[in-house]
Image (cartoon, grey):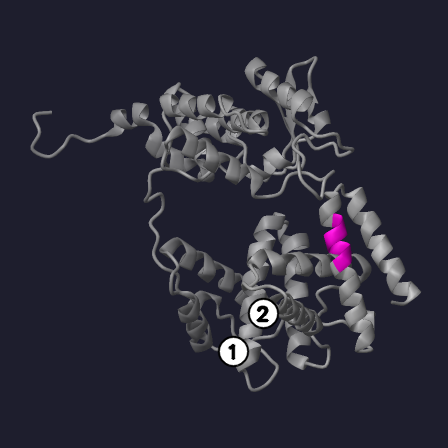
Amino acid sequence: MSHEYGALVLQFRETLTQQRYNRVIVDSYCRNADYFLSYLAERKIAFEAVTPTDVSNYLCLAVQRFCEGHSRAPARYWVSIPRAGIHGLLRLTLKHWPPEPATSDVGELLCREVCDQYQTWLREERGLAVASIDALMWEARYFCAWHMGRSATPTFMDLSIQDVDVYFDMRAPGLRRKSLKDVAERLRGLMRHLHRTGRTAVDLSPQIIAPMLYAYETIPSALSSVQIAAVLKSTLEDRSPLGLRDYAILLLLSTYGLRDKEIRRLRLDDIDWRAGTITLRRTKGRREDVLPLPATTGAAIAAYLQHERPKTRNHAIFVRHVAPRDQPVGPDLVRKTIKRAYARAGLPYTRSHLLRHTMANRLLAGGSSLKEVADVLRHRSLNTTLIYAKLDSRNLVEVALPWPGSAS
């Protein structure tokens, strides 16, 4: 192996070590990266010109060689380790990996240009949240690639409502009405953008028909006080290595009705221990709220910080306990924590948003108005809170009409 390739592996090892990967994993990743670079050198493939096909060919060869020396077929684990090591090396040393589509394809270039403009407009003009932009852009990229793959010419001028219907029918199998409505809304936004930028002669968005969903046709589920107590008790009594972290997360969710991302974005300097307050920043409503910190919740967070939180330079309250370390917890951590807590308490639920519904139900039962519920849940619009009006049985009784044929 050349000196240049040896320096790449050394840099890769140093990066993994800084991210506090286990020594065995570091050795395994670097060993597979070393094998891959030797494979490229033998076939005179420039490292800067590596393609996903080259990676796939190497992995197939590696699995074949493994099978020759073992009596049983390789498990997925034996393939995932080489793949992880190679992709980690490529992401570290190459600026663009995976590589962009070939620039000689006019259709690919047009799709990329349309999607880049659309994303910029959603971010700068509409001011949407990152998660909303990601959902819209996924649909936009999928639709543009689908249309260019079946269109005779690289243009959107020949796009018709019949084409949109064909795409919609392709996406429909296996989706519920709510998901189908979301697909229709995303397509409408893309159609408006294509017409606004002059890429289609007619605005097709009004012709896209979404499945009928009646406003507030469902009743939000909510946990009872007994069920909430069972969830918290089962977590507090859990003897797992991360029981204190899970308990602190559950208390934050049940006390403030936080969203998943708001939990993950909490930082050490958001808590004022002397004043007994917690500040919620970077929320979905783009607000900054200072809320009182109950003693029980504060004690749970302090116990996690003192006894379970790993040593790290990151200022996030909840950080990763496994490599790559020194990073905030991932997007799935809160959902998995809630799911485990429900299972321990014997409840047939999985959604973390259920605790927000429970918070709203508890406030309404205590006599709070919808405006007060909207303030606590940090809704930018009161219309978002109207769905909880169906939980307000105290006020619904006063407006209920007599049942036909009853004595009243």
Using the image, determine if residue 265 lies above or below residue 56.
above
Q: Which mark is residue 194?
A: 2
Q: Could you say which is closer to the camera, residue 277 or residue 79?
A: 79
Is residue 320 highlighted in magenta?
A: no
- Which amino acid is tagged 2? Leu
Magenta stretch: dominant secondary structure: helix
Q: Secondary structure at mark 2?
A: helix
Picture quadrant of residue 392: top left
Q: Could you say which is closer to the camera, residue 360 or residue 174?
A: 174
- Which amino acid is tagged 1? Leu
Per the rendered image, the range of residues in magenta is 26-31
Picture quadrant of residue 19: top right
Confirm or deny contact between disc 2 and disc 1 (CB under 8 A).
yes
| 287 lies left or right of 100 | left
Residue at point 38%, 25% (across, down): 227
Residue placed under numbered mark 1 in the picture: 159
